[in-house]
């Protein structure tokens, strides 16, 4: 899979699938049932509830429901949603531009043009802000263990990352 650099500032390359994953969680932050329904459908599609499976005592519907309830996917969704809500609280207090962008783009689902108008951004500034927001979430998700990533993969070491965090807080 090819990696796209989502930021020059942090020196981190975010894979496209992480970008999509973060966006999906943001869009459904207050609609977790949508995310849970995807997991439920996954298990329903994988169920083998034939009479022969029941007779063997293996893949019964009850066993499948238990697997779904204990699913790591559901735990991951819960961790991501909790993480993003906490990060939003932080952004609201410390980075109001990030919070405003997320609120308009993902929670209120406004168009890019609408967001540019409300936040008084040109196209370049809009793209840069979106990149910064996604990158900040990505870095924090790595720190929280939600994304297993090696800092060297993005050509950044811990000292550089700390300096970037400090510089970012000053801006």
Image (tube, rainbow, N blue to C red):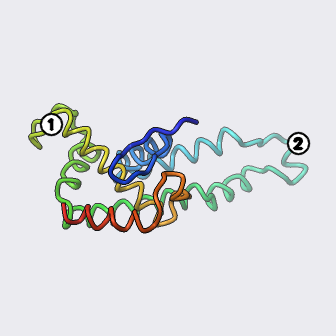
Residue 52, numbered label: 2
Is the residue marked by circle 1 packed among few (<14), some (14-19), or many (20+) residues within 10 Å? some
| Residue at 41 percent of width and 49 percent of height | 25
Mark 1 = which residue? 116
Q: Position of residue 120 (x, y in %)?
A: 9, 40
64 w.r.t. 16: above or below: below
- Between residue 125 and residue 137, name the one nearer to us: 125
Of badges 1 and 2, the one in the foreground is: 1
Residue 163 falls in image quadrant: bottom left
Whole-percent x, y for residue 53 in the image:
85, 45
Near mark 2 (Cα within 10 A), the count class, few <14, some 14-19 or many ≥20, is few
In the image, is 163 to the left or to the right of 53?
left
Say which quadrant the C terminus sits in: bottom left
Above or below residue 3? Residue 154 is: below
The structure residue drawn at horizontal position 41% and vertical position 58%, both measured from the top left corner, is 139
Specify which label sits upstream in the sequence, 1 or 2: 2
Query: Quarter holding the N terminus?
Result: top right
């Amino acid at each position: 899979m090819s990696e796209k650099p989502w930021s020059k500032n942090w020196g981190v390359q975010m894979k496209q699938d992480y970008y999509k994953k973060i966006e999906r969680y943001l869009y459904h932050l207050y609609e977790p049932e949508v995310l849970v329904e995807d997991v439920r459908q996954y298990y329903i599609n994988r169920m083998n509830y034939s009479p022969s499976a029941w007779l063997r005592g293996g893949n019964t519907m009850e066993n499948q429901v238990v697997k779904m309830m204990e699913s790591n996917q559901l735990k991951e969704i819960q961790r991501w949603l909790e993480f993003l809500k906490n990060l939003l609280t932080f952004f609201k207090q410390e980075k109001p531009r990030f919070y405003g962008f997320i609120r308009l783009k993902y929670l209120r689902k406004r168009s890019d043009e609408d967001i540019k108008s409300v936040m008084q951004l040109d196209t370049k500034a809009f793209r840069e802000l979106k990149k910064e927001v996604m990158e900040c979430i990505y870095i924090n998700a790595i720190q929280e263990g939600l994304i297993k990533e090696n800092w060297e993969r993005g050509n950044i070491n811990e000292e550089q990352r700390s300096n970037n965090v400090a510089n970012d807080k000053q801006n």
